[in-house]
Amino acid sequence: MQKLLKAVFYTVFALQRSTTAILTERFTVLLRSCTKSPITRFISFLCIVVLLPSCKIPNKISEHQEFVQKTVYGSPSVESHYLAFDDLRLHYLQAGHAKDGIVVWIHGTPGSAGDLGALFLDEAFTSNILLVAPDRPGWKASQPLPESQPVTGSHRSKHSTLFPDFSDQERYLGGLIRKLRTQHPDVPIILAGHSWGASVSLYIALKNQQTIDGLMLLAGGLDPKLTKPRWYNKAASTLVVKAALPQMLRDANVEVYALHDQLKALEPRWSELDIPVMVLQGDKDRLVNPKNAIFAASQLKKAERSQYKVLMLKAQGHLLQMERLGLIAKCAKAMVANQLEQCKE
């Protein structure tokens, strides 16, 4: 009984101060500490279903989203563009000048083109670097054309169309990168991905090594053994819990389920990487196991790659794009200059 009450208490506490485990770390930490047995997990699920509709997004995230909507999207220095395909329009934001290079940012799940927030407005960064950030296919404004046929492997529901297959993501995101290369043939293009965006960026990089000049993987799931769906992902797939989740989190869960098998297929291909690689990972990340960075380091070392760097950030969680924007800018500049040693805390 004590365990049941504790599970209820922690679930209520977590939901009052956070949102579901898919979106925030605090929920995961608190719930994991009290849900070791199936029965306590079941009670927690019931609490989620009852309390989730009244949840509020954490202040840090809601403030960031408000800033992006009002300030980033409203800034005259931030341009909004679409790249048309025969079955989808890919939306992306861009700011800056490609004097020294281009950084293409791939957001996680859930996420959007504006995730880097204030970096779009940072003249010290954008004066010499063009920052380009798409809404990944299936998210926000990057949606299939109404008359198009469903893409093989896509996940189409009443409210959304997702593209959990890396190959589909690469078709569109790789198309954007190749367009940028045509427009700017003489400057380095750095591909940077965060969280799920880092996972798919590994695939995109392998398919476009003649087009991009460097790869940044931030807080990404990279080890197939560490990216299997967790118990709360499985819970979120049940009809009862799914009905209580916002569509955004249902969609995120679909993408999480797609990770393991695709990363398993990529595991033997790390040796094919022939570009500089940088990995940034918080050692207190509760959404992506920090051991993913250790896995990446072992794969890069095994491939005898001389140009790579793995930086484990002390006392850092998952939300690098909100909490370590200065470091991201510094390391992106280091990648553009091909001076990986300059990326440090």
Image: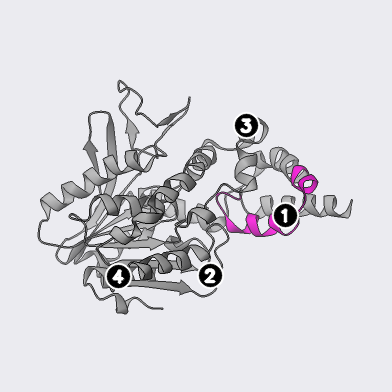
Q: Quadrant of the C terminus?
A: bottom left
Which of pointers 4 and 2 indicates the residue nearer the eye? 4
Q: What amino acid is labelled 4 in the image?
A: Arg
Residues 202 and 162: in front is 202
Residue under label 3, please give it: 243
Q: Residues within 10 Å of mark 2 (few under 14, many from 20)?
A: many
Which of pointers 4 and 1 indicates the residue nearer the eye? 4
Badge 2 element: loop
Q: CA distance from mark 4 to mark 1?
A: 46 Å
Q: Quadrant of residue 33?
A: bottom right
Q: Where is residue 200 drawn, in percent x and y?
A: 37, 50
Q: Residues within 10 Å of mark 1 (few under 14, many from 20)?
A: some
Which of pointers 3 and 2 indicates the residue nearer the eye? 2
Q: CA distance from mark 4 to mark 2?
A: 24 Å
Q: Residues within 10 Å of mark 4 (few under 14, many from 20)?
A: some
Q: Residue furthest top?
A: 147
Residue under label 2, please give it: 283
Badge 4 element: loop
Q: CA distance from mark 1 to mark 2?
A: 24 Å
Q: Earlier in the sequence, mark 3 or mark 2?
A: 3
Which of pointers 1 and 3 indicates the residue nearer the eye? 3
Q: What amino acid is labelled 2 in the image?
A: Asp
Q: CA distance from mark 3 to mark 2?
A: 33 Å
14 displayed left or right of 61: right
Residue under label 1, please give it: 13
**Label for residue 224?**
none
Residue under label 4, please give it: 305
**235 relative to 183, above or below:** above
Residue drawn at x 47%, y 27% as measured from the top left: 157
Badge 1 element: helix
Q: Where is residue 35 drawn, in percent x and y?
A: 74, 53
